[in-house]
Image (spheres, rainbow, N blue to C red):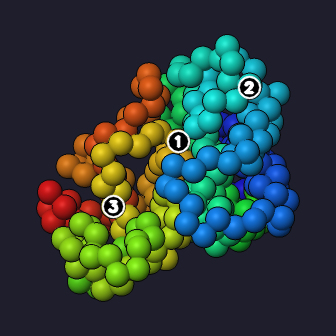
Amino acid sequence: MIESPPFPAELTAAVEAAVEAGDLIARAYVDFVAIPNARADLTTEVDRQAQEAALRALQRRFPTDAYCAEEDTPSLVGRERTGSRLWIIDPIDGTRGFAMKNGEFSVMIAFQHDGVLEVGVVHEPAAKRATFAWRGGRCWVGSLTDAKLCRVTTTADLAQATLTQSRSKPGAPPTEPVRLLQPAAVVETYSAGVKLALVARGEADLYANTYPNFSDWDIAAGHILVTEAGGTVTGLRGQPLVYGRPGAAQRLGLLGSNGVLHDAALAKLG
């Protein structure tokens, strides 16, 4: 990489652990029998296996760090779940996309130090694509040795914006963000990580998460991608998002944007 990250070992470990977990997922994906109407709360054995792969890879290097992850797997037993050095992991973000075999899922790994997000990786196994960032180092897509710089869009008018959101049922009425923001285009995909990566790579302008209850691992890695790509991420009322609290709960919603549209979108969503 061109710039030197403040936490080089953590960056390398995060990318390598995400790819290792992603490779396990990709192998399982080949023979997985699709579940056309998979539930939103579905968890598969592959989720647990992928999380164990990521945790083992990270814990070999950082045995005393704290680990916050979605699944209750053996490598979390006896571990601190929050602390000054904290890893935040979602082994398969967008499990419905995995279960339906449409490719819309990701491995998400973030590292936080003293309450500040330092590293984030969103790895998409089906697309064989990793988008990653570190504080002060901007956002990249590719590998640690061969990566392309990412940048958010410069779209300045909501009427010309592209909004990304989760897939809706055929024939369903417009979602609240679509109804309120009236974007020019909507890109639907599973995985909050994928959606935030779309914003970071300039493939969408906005992502609004209006779910009342979600968790740190759903958004932490994608959060730093967007901000390092030049965008803005806040709660739905403009509040800063905090990670690493006991319980890892997020209750403020999320708006990730190219920054230019952020205030206007907040005003509409409020």
Q: In which quarter of the image is the C terminus?
A: bottom left
The kind of residue tagged 1 is Trp
In the rendered view, does 172 fall on the left or right side of 264? right
Sequence-earlier tag: 3 or 2: 2
Would residue 263 be seen by someone viewing this image from the given angle?
no
Sequence-earlier tag: 1 or 3: 3
Q: Are marks 3 and 2 in contact (CB under 8 Å)?
A: no
Which of the labelled discs sits on residue 264, or is there none? none
Q: Name the residue under label 3.
A: 208
Q: In this view, does 141 lie above or below 178?
A: above
Q: How far apart are marks 1 and 2 (CA)?
A: 16 Å
Which residue is drawn at the image coordinates 41% and 43% (left, top)?
Answer: 214
The kind of residue tagged 3 is Ala
Q: Is residue 193 above or below residue 181?
A: above
User: Could you tell me residue 190's position as x and y percent?
Assistant: 52, 64
Numbered disc 2: secondary structure? helix
User: Could you tell me residue 253's position as x and y percent?
Assistant: 31, 48
Which residue is drawn at the image coordinates 44% and 77% (left, top)?
Answer: 187
Q: Distance between the residues labelled 1 and 3?
A: 16 Å
Q: Mark 2 points at which residue?
A: 75
Mark 1 crowdedness (10 Å alpha carbons): few <14, some 14-19, many ≥20: many
Numbered disc 3: secondary structure? strand
Q: In this view, does 214 lie above or below 156?
A: above
The kind of residue tagged 2 is Ser
Would residue 253 be seen by someone viewing this image from the given angle?
yes
Which of the labelled discs sits on residue 217, or is there none? 1
In the rendered view, does 233 fall on the left or right side of 139? left
Q: In which quarter of the image is residue 183?
A: bottom left
Mark 3 crowdedness (10 Å alpha carbons): few <14, some 14-19, many ≥20: many
